[in-house]
Image (cartoon, grey):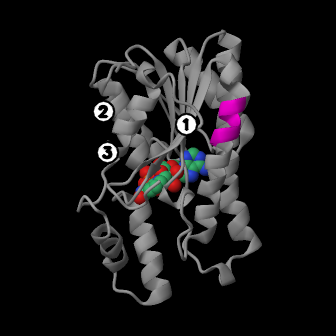
Amino acid sequence: MSVKGKAVLVTGASQGIGKGIALRLAKDGANVALVDIKEDKLAGVKAEVEAFGVKATTFVADVSKRDQVYAAVEHTEKALGGFDVIVNNAGIAQVKPLADVTPEDLERIFRINVDGVVWGIQAGAAKFKALGHKGKIINASSIAGHDGFAMLGVYSATKFAVRALTQAAAKEYASAGITVNAYCPGIVGTDMWVEIDERFAEITGAPKGETYKKYVDGIALGRAQTPEDVAALVAFLASDDSDYITGQAILTDGGIVYR
Ligand SMILES: NC(=O)c1ccc[n+]([C@@H]2O[C@H](COP(=O)([O-])OP(=O)(O)OC[C@H]3O[C@@H](n4cnc5c(N)ncnc54)[C@H](O)[C@@H]3O)[C@@H](O)[C@H]2O)c1
């Protein structure tokens, strides 16, 4: 299983799962472009990536903006001397009972979690075609892309949408040698879960930490997921070993949702 020498763009790479993916791919020999809105954290991740002896570059882009995603892809090709894989990882959570969801709530999360993936698919596939070679598009879905979760209804809707886009894109781009897959993590102890837990505490009155603990207690393998656990699946999807897999949204959750 190898991604050695491949040029990979990872969005949402400043922290959490995206950072974990970037480091794992670098360890496996890939050159990595780190894309995020959080500029201050990118330099530190770049240094960690370069410590594996590969090339790294950073680019500040908001994935909800089509032109910025295209610019990130252009930058990656120039900086890394190629373009082979795009990981559309950036996303945000939203904890709210459906009764309270506003038009602004819907607008904000769909622009990032869904539009961002559409732009990543478009820009990535256009670049692979322009370069005249195969490519891999890897999107962040979730267990919430397979089951709708209470208080996370709109978030779940965005992650179901990512699964639909993954299937449709796989069919549209197969003839160009482009595969499109999604990874579906469970409960990963990142800042996103700190925020989810805090919002649950505000809404339900649950003590801080209890919602996270409740979800982790429900995992068959008995522990929370790490970014490294997620990165192991993404490294496989980025490698030639997954060449015959397309249109799939693969669960990596330690045993929460069974499909
Ligand atoms: N944490 C979990 O348990 C979990 C489970 C399933 C799926 N996911 C998905 O995995 C992905 C990463 O989640 P995480 O837990 O690492 O979250 P995180 O909040 O720790 O990190 C998300 C990163 O995305 C960046 N980002 C946010 N909006 C952006 C935008 N508009 N443009 C560019 N970058 C942006 C943030 O700055 C941040 O660096 C998300 O798509 C999330 O929905 C997370």
Q: Which residues are magenta?
A: 166-171
Left or right: residue 21 compared with residue 123: left
Circle 1/circle 3 CB separation < 8 Å: no
Q: Give the crowd class for mark 1: few <14, some 14-19, many >=20 residues within 10 Å.
A: many
Residue under circle 2?
A: 48
Is 254 situated above or below 53?
below
Picture quadrant where residue 86 is located? top right
Residue 165 belongs to the span the image colors magenta: no
Q: Secondary structure at mark 3?
A: helix
Q: Nearer the viewer, mark 2 or mark 1?
A: 1
x, y (%) of residue 238?
45, 27
Is 249 situated above or below 176?
below
Which callout, 2 or 3, points at the residue further toward the start of the chain?
A: 2
Q: Which mark is residue 207?
A: none
Q: Secondary structure at mark 1?
A: strand
| Whether residue 43 can be seen here | no
Q: Residue at x 63, y 57 (%)?
A: 158
Q: Amino acid at mark 2?
A: Glu
Q: Which mark is residue 229?
A: 3
Q: Which mark is residue 181?
A: 1
Which callout, 2 or 1, points at the residue further toward the start of the chain?
A: 2
Q: Amino acid at mark 1?
A: Asn
Is 105 situated above or below 158?
below
